[in-house]
Image (cartoon, rainbow, N blue to C red):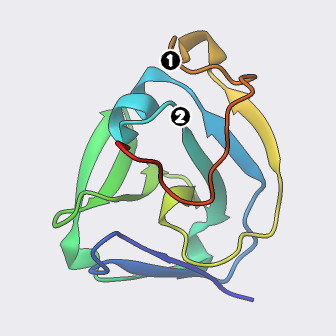
Amino acid sequence: MAISGSCLCGAVTYQITSKVSDVVHCHCVTCRKAHGAAFSSVAFAAAEGFQLQGAEGLGSYESSPGKNRFFCKKCGTQVYAKREGADYVILRLGSLDTYLPGKEIAHTWMSERADWFDLDADLARHEEGIEGA
């Protein structure tokens, strides 16, 4: 079963035919700022099984030495990241369109976590949005 995803505007799409790792949630300040969120959920996929369409619509940013984050130039969605010389891509799971077989295995960089986010909070859950949000 192929895994697929896309950016918000649909200009960039991808399919993954290789195995994808389990899920890691990264709380480092770089991921928080890049995604504008409390953390970034990622998984790793072999680069050889990652097929990208619309690559001309991607921009990139070297967020740390040798690590580039690739995003849609039109809508800003971060699609994936890649380290120089790595044979895998770091898939940004917010861009998935299909089911991801696997499980969550870790929260990393908790030392840099957002002080306004409580991982253990018992919050209300809503199937859809709430007024004012």
Tell me residue 27's x, y (percent).
56, 27
Does residue 30 appear anywhere in the picture? yes
Outermost residue on the front side: it is 131
Distance (Cα) linking label 2 and label 1: 8 Å
> Vertical placement of 29 versus 91: above or below?
above
Outermost residue on the left side: it is 74
Q: In the picture provided, is 44 more to the left or to the right than 77?
A: right
> Vertical placement of 51 versus 44: above or below?
below
- Residue neighbourhood size for the residue with mark 1, other residues' Cα within 10 Å, grouped as few (<14), some (14–19), many (≥20): some
At 83% across and 54% down in the image, what residue appears?
A: 103
Circle nearer the N terminus (2, 1): 2
At 43% across and 35% down in the image, what residue appears?
A: 37
The numbered mark at residue 22 is: none
At 20% across and 73% down in the image, what residue appears?
A: 57
Which of 97/18 is in front? 97
Q: Are marks 2 and 1 in contact (CB under 8 Å)?
A: yes
Residue annotated with mark 1: 114
Residue annotated with mark 2: 39
> Vertical placement of 38 versus 6: above or below?
above
Q: Amino acid at mark 2?
A: Phe
Tell me residue 109's x, y (percent).
62, 21
Which image quarter is the N terminus in?
bottom right
Which of 30/126 is in front? 126
Tell me residue 22's x, y (percent).
78, 54
